[in-house]
Image (cartoon, rainbow, N blue to C red):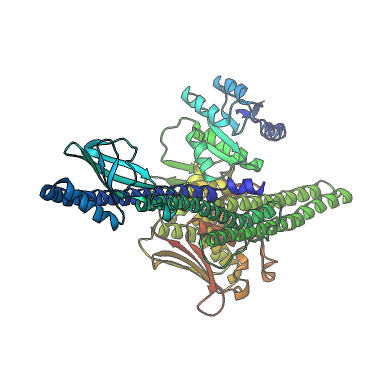
């Protein structure tokens, strides 16, 4: 992936760039808003990482200008302002996701992957398959090896989100935001128990485990080939 | 300088304006009295003279000039204030109580006013008089008048009174204004002095009260209440700063020590990796604590009041309970919920969810294995009541106020994870919604019951 990082804090930018390069992405970095806008308008990036506070032109203006000009590159906002109204402002300006500083690199990378995947034009998909596990969004059926698995509505939503991002790392915060629509961190790790409950339904009685824990980051669902 | 201050004070200016209005009305009143009194007296004098003239005319008609002179002579002997003079055409007196024909110009209808010497034996210098003059048969002139010195005296007296009244009004007004201004300035100076001392840093200062309950006392009471609030906030801020410094220093210290030990021991990559991972976890905990603090500060600043929307607290409660249900099961805690219908409210879904999550978190943590946690959501006297009760050790009554303060953790819970900010957040959310958080003993006798009351409407 080609990623443009618009961030005036050099240390933070280096940290992001090094991490992304490590994962095999091509990263360009600029330190002010005007240059960032010019580069982003060339429309040759798969994703933009934009800080909200920038010299010369702030992040919100960059993104709204891009959107007015028809540039649809997915945007991940970074900000020290983390409250709900800031998030809402960022998304209204045309951002696709919002991450509050300080953040874990794994969080940033997982969200970028999810953004780019979602940004790809796809026909409306109602069936997802990972190995021998299948879900049908319309009939809300889940089967593995052809056997029907009963899931609670929330468990189904959780599995659906994981399968939409199959092969990608999904963090606990992403699950909380997308499956439960909460933007706060519960003190104890309630997500882990939900995952292990789901795991006992879809993995326990079958050969190959599909739902995997990625240490220090989150979870992923994939079939090992 | 103090005099100048006094003169430029608002009270003095008000008193001065009042005095000018008051003096103006006193002046108008006295002028009216003067004008109407003298008018009445002048008309009376003229009427008396007319009556005398009519009497003398009758005498003249019945007996001619001789009779007239006789009557004048008789009346002159006991005249009182009346004046008579019958003179020849050239002004030589014939009979009467005036010694000479007055030197004064005649007004219309024969009226004239003049001064004359009253009888020398009385020693009076000169009196004013008013009279009417006639020609009699072309050979004589008749003057009939009255001494109006008494009337003039009354007029003079009224004028003097008017002058004095004005002078006294002005003097009393200035004096009263000055005294009032000095009194008010004295009272306000107390407030000013206190304010200055507070600005200089002595927050314990209070404006002294007179105990009279007047408006300045009320102002002082309000100021004192405000000062008490400010002092409370300052003390609170200081405590929180101390707590932050203390509670954040120990994890930072742990973090630093671990890295240092890893460097000293040099046990190879595997050990380094483990140390780094632990360090990241600890840094994450610190970040979480900071986020929680910032979140509480933001809620307390009321910044999120705009985020209020119509929400169904029942649905919010069901969602959070569902989120925690597997966690409760894993901790072998029996979690049950009783949620009433129609719990609509204007509020912040995110914050109410987080509050209930914090309460549930605590309840599950302290209920312990085989414990029971119950969630209750219902309407009670215009409030929506969200209660979480557990069968844990509870909180001693003496500590229940304290635990909602930032970083306060009871000894019993020191070993459990958490920074002591959970209940602070719940309390802040309650205040944001103009509700309250109540901590009680669970009905069973053991354990805690935490209730969040949110007013409807």
Q: Would residue B311 be seen by someone viewing this image from the given angle?
A: yes
Q: Residue at x 44, y 49 (%)?
A: B125
Hey, which quadrant is residue A138 in on the image? top left
| Quarter of image, res B332 | bottom right
Residue closer to the observer: B286 or B144: B144
* Residue A148 showing in the rendered view: no
Which of the image's four quarters has the C terminus of chain B? bottom left
Q: Position of residue A7 (x, y in %)?
A: 65, 31
Q: Position of residue B5 (x, y in %)?
A: 62, 47
Q: Is residue B345 left or right of residue A44?
A: left
**So how many labels did they put on this image?**
0
Quadrant of res B445: bottom right
Of B51 and A143, nearer the camera is: B51
Check the image and report above or below for B352 versus B131. Answer: below
Q: Is residue B61 left or right of residue A76?
A: left
Q: Residue furthest bottom?
A: B445
Find residue B304 and report its horizontal and vertical position in percent: 51, 48
The residue furthest left is B62
> Which residue is more in the foreground, B191 or A141?
B191
Q: Which residue does the image show at 55% across and 63% down from the upper left?
A: B359
Vertical position of residue A112 compared to residue B179: above or below: above
Residue ranking furthest to the right: B264
Q: Residue B167 placed where, x, y %?
A: 50, 50
Image vertical order of residue B223 relative to residue B371, above or below: above
């Amino acid at each position: 992936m080609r990623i443009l990082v618009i961030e005036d804090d050099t240390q933070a930018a280096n940290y992001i760039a090094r991490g992304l390069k490590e994962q095999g992405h091509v990263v360009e970095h600029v330190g002010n808003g005007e240059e960032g806008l010019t580069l982003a308008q060339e429309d040759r990036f798969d994703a933009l990482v934009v800080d909200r506070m920038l010299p010369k032109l702030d992040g919100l203006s960059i993104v709204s200008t891009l959107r007015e000009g028809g540039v649809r590159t997915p945007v991940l906002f970074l900000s020290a302002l983390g409250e709900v109204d800031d998030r809402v402002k960022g998304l209204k300006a045309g951002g696709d996701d919002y991450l509050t500083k300080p953040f874990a690199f794994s969080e940033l990378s997982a969200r970028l992957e999810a953004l780019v995947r979602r940004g790809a034009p796809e026909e409306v998909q109602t069936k997802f398959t990972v190995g021998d596990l299948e879900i049908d969004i319309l009939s809300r059926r889940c089967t593995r090896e052809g056997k029907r698995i009963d899931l609670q509505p929330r468990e189904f939503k959780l599995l659906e989100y994981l399968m939409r991002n199959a092969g990608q790392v999904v963090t606990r915060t992403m699950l909380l935001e997308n499956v439960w629509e909460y933007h706060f961190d519960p003190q104890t790790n309630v997500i882990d128990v939900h995952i292990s409950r789901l795991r006992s339904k879809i993995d326990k009685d079958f050969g190959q485990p599909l739902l995997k824990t990625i240490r220090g980051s989150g979870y992923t669902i994939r079939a090992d080939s | 300088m103090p005099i100048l201050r006094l003169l430029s004070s608002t009270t003095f200016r008000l008193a001065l304006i009042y005095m000018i209005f008051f003096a103006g009305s006193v002046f108008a009143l006295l002028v009216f009295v003067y004008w109407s009194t003298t008018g009445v007296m002048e008309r009376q004098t003229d009427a008396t003279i007319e009556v005398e003239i009519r009497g003398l005319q009758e005498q003249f008609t019945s007996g001619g000039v001789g009779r007239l002179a006789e009557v004048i002579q008789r009346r002159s002997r006991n005249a009182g204030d009346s004046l008579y003079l019958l003179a020849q055409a050239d002004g030589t007196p014939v009979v009467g109580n005036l010694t000479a024909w007055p030197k004064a110009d005649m007004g219309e209808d024969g009226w004239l006013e003049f001064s004359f010497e009253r009888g020398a034996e009385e020693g009076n210098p000169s009196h004013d008089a008013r009279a009417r003059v006639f020609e009699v048969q072309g050979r004589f002139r008749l003057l009939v008048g009255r001494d109006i010195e008494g009337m003039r005296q009354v007029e003079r007296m009224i004028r003097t009174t008017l002058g004095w009244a004005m002078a006294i009004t002005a003097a009393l007004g200035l004096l009263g204004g000055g005294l009032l201004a000095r009194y008010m300035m004295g009272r306000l100076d107390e407030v000013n002095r206190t304010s200055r001392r507070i600005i200089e840093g002595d927050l314990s200062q209070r404006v002294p009260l007179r105990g009279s309950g007047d408006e300045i006392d009320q102002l002082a009471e309000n100021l004192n209440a405000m000062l008490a609030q400010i002092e409370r906030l300052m003390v609170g801020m200081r405590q929180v700063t101390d707590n932050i410094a203390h509670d954040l220093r120990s994890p930072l210290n742990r973090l630093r020590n671990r890295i240092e030990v890893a460097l000293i021991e040099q046990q190879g990559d595997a050990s380094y990796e483990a140390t780094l991972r632990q360090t990241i976890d600890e840094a994450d905990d610190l970040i979480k604590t900071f986020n929680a603090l910032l979140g509480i500060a933001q809620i307390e600043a009321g910044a999120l009041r705009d985020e209020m929307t119509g929400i169904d607290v029942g649905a919010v409660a069901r969602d959070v309970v569902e989120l925690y249900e597997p966690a409760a099961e894993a901790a072998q805690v029996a979690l049950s919920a009783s949620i009433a219908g129609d719990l609509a409210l204007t509020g912040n879904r995110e914050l109410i969810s987080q509050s209930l999550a914090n309460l549930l978190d605590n309840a599950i943590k302290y209920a312990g294995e085989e414990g029971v946690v119950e969630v209750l959501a219902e309407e009670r006297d215009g409030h929506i009541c969200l209660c979480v009760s557990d069968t844990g050790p509870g909180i001693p009554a003496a500590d229940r106020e304290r635990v909602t303060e930032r970083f306060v953790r009871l000894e019993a819970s020191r070993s459990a994870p958490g920074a002591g900010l959970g209940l602070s957040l719940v309390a802040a959310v309650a205040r944001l919604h103009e509700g309250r958080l109540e901590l009680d003993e669970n009905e069973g006798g053991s354990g805690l019951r935490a209730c969040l009351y949110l007013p409807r409407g």
